[in-house]
Image (tube, helix red, strand yellow):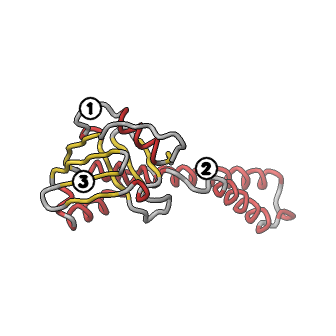
């Protein structure tokens, strides 16, 4: 929370969550790597392990070069696949379908009010209030604002689709989120 409090009037949203909203939330939540330095460390460890495991005395210079190039290509393909899996919408379709099927109230029309005191969500069968301390971080995507309880993989998320903004302008909601949360 910033030291200067910016007072923004309440922001109203009216929406019905769809599977694409949850997909956007899951992907935004998983997109942020907490330890980006770990990937180069794993690559270096794999290359060192490959070098130490090969008996280079019996290999010619051409074989060593081919082995090195093969290792780099394999590492590059592995990193590309890792990146694609982190951002893959198809990977989250099944869990999202299960969440939506197991919680029918998620498909009800929702009215949300976001202000300096927190968030209030109401639907036909539920009414919830959340303080800003429940959502410490947020991620903005092209389609929504994804509020996150923490950076942990199993952390609670709340998806606020931009299409649900009553005024259509995301700037007031963005200002509230910047005041009370940190960007991820």
* Place of residue 85 in the rendered image (x, y in percent of width and height, measured from the top left): 46, 54
In the picture, measured across the screen, residue 142 lies left or right of residue 97, that is right
* Place of residue 39 in the rendered image (x, y in percent of width and height, measured from the top left): 64, 55
Q: Residue, x 57% and y 52% (percent of image)?
A: 79
Helix, strand or loop for disc 2: helix
Q: Nearer the viewer, residue 38 or 68?
A: 38
Whichever of labels 3 and 2 marks the residue nearer the N terminus, that label is 2
Please state which of the two labelled residues, at mark 1 or mark 3, is closer to the viewer. 3
Q: Residue, x 40% and y 41% (percent of image)?
A: 176
Q: Which mark is residue 168?
A: 1
Residue tagged 2: 76
> In which quadrant of the rendered view does residue 26 lie?
bottom left
Q: Residue, x 31% and y 31% (percent of image)?
A: 169
* Place of residue 68 in the rendered image (x, y in percent of width and height, measured from the top left): 73, 53
| C-alpha span from label 3 to label 2 | 45 Å
> In which quadrant of the rendered view does residue 127 lie?
bottom left
Please state which of the two labelled residues, at mark 1 or mark 2, is closer to the viewer. 1
Q: Residue, x 28% and y 48% (percent of image)?
A: 20
Asked if the residue at tag 2 contacts the one at tag 3, i.e. Cβ–Cβ closer than 8 Å, the answer is: no
Residue tagged 3: 121
Helix, strand or loop for disc 1: loop
Q: Nearer the viewer, residue 110 or 52?
A: 110
Around disc 2, counting alpha carbons within 10 Å, would you say few (fewer than 14), some (14 to 19), or many (20 or more)? few
| C-alpha span from label 1 to label 3 | 18 Å
Image position of 173 with respect to 74: above or below: above
Whichever of labels 1 and 3 marks the residue nearer the N terminus, that label is 3
Image position of 96 with respect to 116: above or below: below
Q: Nearer the viewer, residue 9 or 111?
A: 9
| C-alpha span from label 1 to label 2 | 42 Å
In the picture, measured across the screen, residue 14 lies left or right of residue 28, that is left
In the picture, measured across the screen, residue 69 lies left or right of residue 34, that is right
Around disc 1, counting alpha carbons within 10 Å, would you say few (fewer than 14), some (14 to 19), or many (20 or more)? few
């Amino acid at each position: 929370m910033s030291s200067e409090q910016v007072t923004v009037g309440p922001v109203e949203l009216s929406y019905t969550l769809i599977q694409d909203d949850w997909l956007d939330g899951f992907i935004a939540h998983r997109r942020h790597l907490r330890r980006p330095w770990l990937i180069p460390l794993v690559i270096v460890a794999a290359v060192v392990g490959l070098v130490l495991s090969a008996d280079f005395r019996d290999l010619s210079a051409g074989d060593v070069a081919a082995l090195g190039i093969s290792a780099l290509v394999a590492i590059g393909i592995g990193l590309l696949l890792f990146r694609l899996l982190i951002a893959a919408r198809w990977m989250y379709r099944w869990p999202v379908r299960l969440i939506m099927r197991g919680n029918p109230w998620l498909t009800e029309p929702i009215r949300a009010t976001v202000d300096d005191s927190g968030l209030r969500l109401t639907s036909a069968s539920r009414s919830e209030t959340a303080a800003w301390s429940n959502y410490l971080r947020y991620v903005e995507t092209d389609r929504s604002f994804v509020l996150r309880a923490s950076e942990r993989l199993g952390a609670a998320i709340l998806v606020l689709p931009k299409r649900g903004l009553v005024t259509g302008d995301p700037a007031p909601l963005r200002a509230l989120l910047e005041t009370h949360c940190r960007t991820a």
